[in-house]
Amino acid sequence: MPEQREALYLRVASDIRDQVESGQIAVGAYIPSVREIAERWDVSVTTATKAQAHLQSIGLVQAVPGHGMMVKARDLSSAVDLLRGAGAGLAGGHHAEGEILSSELVPAPADVAEALDVPEGAPVVRRERISRQKSSGTPVQTSVNWLPYPSTGAPALLSTDRIPQGTFTYLAEILGVRLAGGRQMLSAEAATALQAERLGLEEGTPVLVSREWFTSDQGVVLDYGESVAPPSQWVTYEFTA
């Protein structure tokens, strides 16, 4: 029974987090109250309270006495989710939601090994994602990101399911580090055959390519990735360090 209750409050928290990341609940707005959560998700007050507490523990909301739980301004860990196309960004003025297409353990190619500062051929996680407009289902971004695979293992990284506490929080906890910074590079390029297929474009169409690196407080590269957005789509990332 305890496992069932825990899984339920995490599912509720994940639903609310999705609403925040998709823009349905804006920064500065309040998430549903405990009573509203209990009624809307048909759960107990205890489960609703635990869901709110979990969202507060991961830094998504903060308690405002007399008002409720308010969505906080994006911090760096939230920015990571945005930059990785986890359904939190805005594209072309429409909310987008992301889907992880694949997540697998592979030998690091030379360029990825250099980016992650690991030996070539070392086991790394390759996660491929696509984001689509929620209203129309039109692809607005495709991305591949690469993460080091801890020697102690990190099974959740190899699943296409959403990680409740977030990919980077999960990996940082296993490695015993914390996310400290990032770097992004942007370039206009011609879509490759695969990129064009993913985004529903003709090969060679100009696209916006973004490369990102995120590092820990100990200098460990936690992620290297590339994302691609089609023309006529604004991709907005908002966060504070």
Image: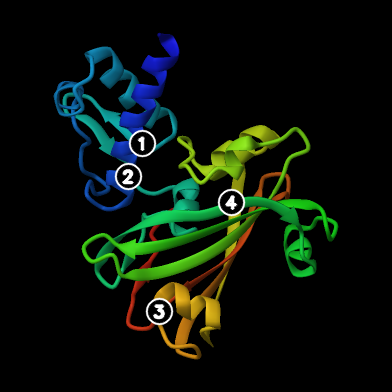
As drawn, the residue found furthest toward the bottom would be 204
Whether pointer 4 and pointer 1 mark residues with C-beta atoms closer than 8 Å, the reply is no
Looking at the rendered structure, the kind of residue marked 4 is: Ser
Considering only order in the chain, which callout, 1 or 4, is on the residue closer to the N terminus? 1
Looking at the rendered structure, the kind of residue marked 1 is: Ser
**Residue corresponding to mark 1:** 14
**Nearer to us in this view, 97 or 56:** 97
Q: Residue at x 40, y 79 (%)?
A: 230
Circle 2 sits in a helix, a strand or a loop, which is it? helix
The local crowd at label 3, few if under 14, some if 14 to 19, many if 20 or more residues have their Cα within 10 Å, is many
- CA separation in Å, label 4 and label 1: 20 Å
- CA separation in Å, label 4 and label 3: 23 Å
**Residue corresponding to mark 3:** 230
- CA separation in Å, label 3 and label 2: 24 Å
Is residue 65 toward the left or the right of residue 173 in the image? left
The local crowd at label 4, few if under 14, some if 14 to 19, many if 20 or more residues have their Cα within 10 Å, is many
Q: Position of residue 184 (x, y in %)?
A: 56, 68
**Residue corresponding to mark 2:** 18
- CA separation in Å, label 2 and label 4: 20 Å
